[in-house]
Image (cartoon, rainbow, N blue to C red):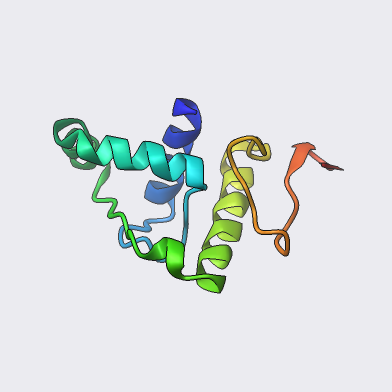
Amino acid sequence: LGNEYIRFLVIKVYTKDELAETTSPSPMIDQVWHQHILDTRSYEKFQLANGKVHHNPDGVFEGEAKDERMTRTVQVYRELFGTTPPSSIWELPSDTIPLETKRGQQM
């Protein structure tokens, strides 16, 4: 889970999504993010090294916009890491692109 959280932060920095407008974490990753934010010294150190990454606590209530951000996050994940996020950690709404176990194989 920790590695997937780090991958999510890489996505946030790569997409320059400082204000949480274009990408979203999965519910599990979001919980890890909350814990990281509460460790203020660690989170500040991360931001000093990588730039600001704000958390929008209302994002979970945004329905379709949240789904679009999640779909974008998975697309960037595939682009950056050459693989599909593990479905055990990255949940997608049923109407978005499916997760894969390996490139080209749908679950």
Image side of residue 106 versus residue 43, left or right: right
Find the residue positioned furthest to the front: 61
Whole-percent x, y for residue 80 in the image: 56, 42
Whole-percent x, y for residue 64 in the image: 56, 72
The quarter of the picture where residue 86 lies is top right
Find the residue positioned furthest to the top: 2
Whole-percent x, y for residue 4 in the image: 50, 33
Residue drawn at x 75%, y 52% is 98
Residue 94 in view (yes/no)? yes
Whole-percent x, y for residue 49 in the image: 22, 37
Residue drawn at x 58%, y 37% is 89
Q: Nearer the viewer, residue 17 or 69?
A: 69
In this rendering, the answer to whether 23 lies above or below 83 is below
Tag count? 0
* Quadrant where the C terminus is found in the figure: top right
The quarter of the picture where residue 96 lies is bottom right
Residue 9 in view (yes/no)? no
The quarter of the picture where residue 102 lies is top right
Residue drawn at x 44%, y 67% is 61
Find the residue positioned furthest to the right: 105
Image side of residue 15 versus residue 41, left or right: right
Residue drawn at x 25%, y 47% is 51
